[in-house]
Amino acid sequence: MDFSHGKYLGVDYGDVRTGLAECDASGLVASGIATVKEGGMRNTAVRVAKEAAARSCKKIIVGLPKNMDGSEGFRAQTVMAFIELLKTETDIPVETYDERLSTVTAYRFLDETGTHGKKRRETIDTLSAQIILQDYLDREKRTAR
C-alpha cells in the first residue's frame, strides 16, 4: 500500500465554533480531532494554520457552504473571507469542498446514535469536518481511478 498521500486537515468553519478533522497518511480515513472556539476569524485562521503545521498536513480542505442550487450565498462569502486570511497564515495549499448536506448528515448520525444536548453541541462541528474531509478523500479516490 502507498502511504505517500500525506495528511490533510478538514475544516468546518463557523463564526463561533470551527470543527477540525484529519486523515491518516494513506488518505483513507478521516477522523474528527477538535472543535476550536478562538473568537474571531483571524484568530481562527491562525489556530487552523498552527494545527495544520503541527500535524504536518500537506493540504487543508475547507467546507464551502453552497445553496442547494449550487450558488454561493452569504455564508460561502464568509468562508471565502476566512480562507483568504488562512492563506496569509500558511504556505500549505488550501482547497474548498462543497459541504452541502454535511451538517444534515452529521445531525442524522447523532440522532441515530442517541447523542443529544450538550454532547451534541460539542461534537457537531467536529463531525461535520470529518464528513467533509471523508467526502473529499472519497472523491479523490474515485477520480484517481
Image: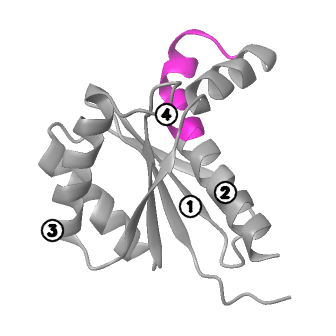
The secondary structure type at the circle numbered 1 is strand
Say whether residue 144 is left or right of residue 66.
right
Residue 19 among those drawn in magenta? no
Query: What span is colored magenta in the figure?
Result: 115-128
Is the residue under label 2 in contact with that under label 1 (CB below 8 Å)? yes
Secondary element type, mark 3:
helix
Q: Is the magenta stretch mostly helix, strand or loop?
A: helix
Q: Which residue position is annotated with label 4?
A: 70
Label 1 sits on residue: 22
Q: Nearer the viewer, residue 94 or 32?
A: 94
Nearer to the camera, 115 or 89: 89
Q: First in sequence: mark 1 or mark 2?
A: 1
14 lies above or below 21: above
Name the residue that disc number 2 marks.
30
Front in this rendered view, residue 13 or 141: 141
Tell me how many marks there are: 4
Amino acid beneath label 2: Ala
The CA distance from mark 1 to mark 2 is 5 Å
Which amino acid lies under the numbered mark 4 shown in the image of this protein?
A: Gly
The answer to whether 142 is drawn above or below residue 11 in the figure is: below
* As drawn, 90 above or below 86: below
